Image (spheres, grey):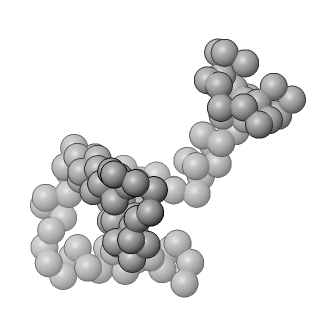
Amino acid sequence: MDQGDVIRALREFVIERDWSQFHTPENLAKSISIEASELLENYQWNSEANLEQVQDELADVLTYCLLLADKLGMDPNEIVLEKLAKTQQKYPVEKARGRSDKYDQL
């Protein structure tokens, strides 16, 4: 199953339930943040998280990200690659390799 299949399945799921009316960009962005917090909660007290719960929360984050991109007419692959190109400029390999410093501290 490729990303196009996933987006089609998400669209069908939403249409069947008549949820498009609730999926404004604002609501989807809020949902991304909420689900990301639920993902982080799995690591709140230690690094040993239940991987099944992490998988479910990660799926929720990705679902809302894909729905938002779709709502805005953006291709997820394209926007990730565009951002990666910008980040590559900020973090050239010769300066950033093995370092976690912010780009303006390299």
Residue at the far top in the pictured view: 104
| Residue at 58% across, 57% down | 77
Which residue is nearer to you in this view: 47 or 38? 47
Q: Which residue occupies 70% across, 39% down?
A: 85
Quick check: 100 above or below 65? Answer: above
Image quadrant where one finds the C terminus: top right
The answer to whether any part of residue 36 appears in the image is: no
Q: Position of residue 23 (x, y in %)?
A: 20, 57
Report x, y in % for residue 93. 82, 34
Residue 4 visible, this angle: yes
Instruction: Report the side of 72 relative to 19 (left or right).
Output: right
**Front residue of 89 and 10:** 89
Residue 20 found in image quarter: bottom left
Most foreground residue, 93 or 14: 93
Point out residue 32 in the picture as x, y percentages from the top left corner. 30, 52
- Check the image and name the residue furthest to the right: 94
At a point 15% along the width and 68% down the height, the residue shown is: 19
Relative to 46, residue 103 above or below? above
Question: Which of the 4 image quadrants contains residue 82?
Answer: top right
Residue 15 placement, left or right of 60: left
Residue placed at 33% from the left, 51% from the top? 44
Q: Is residue 85 left or right of residue 102?
A: right
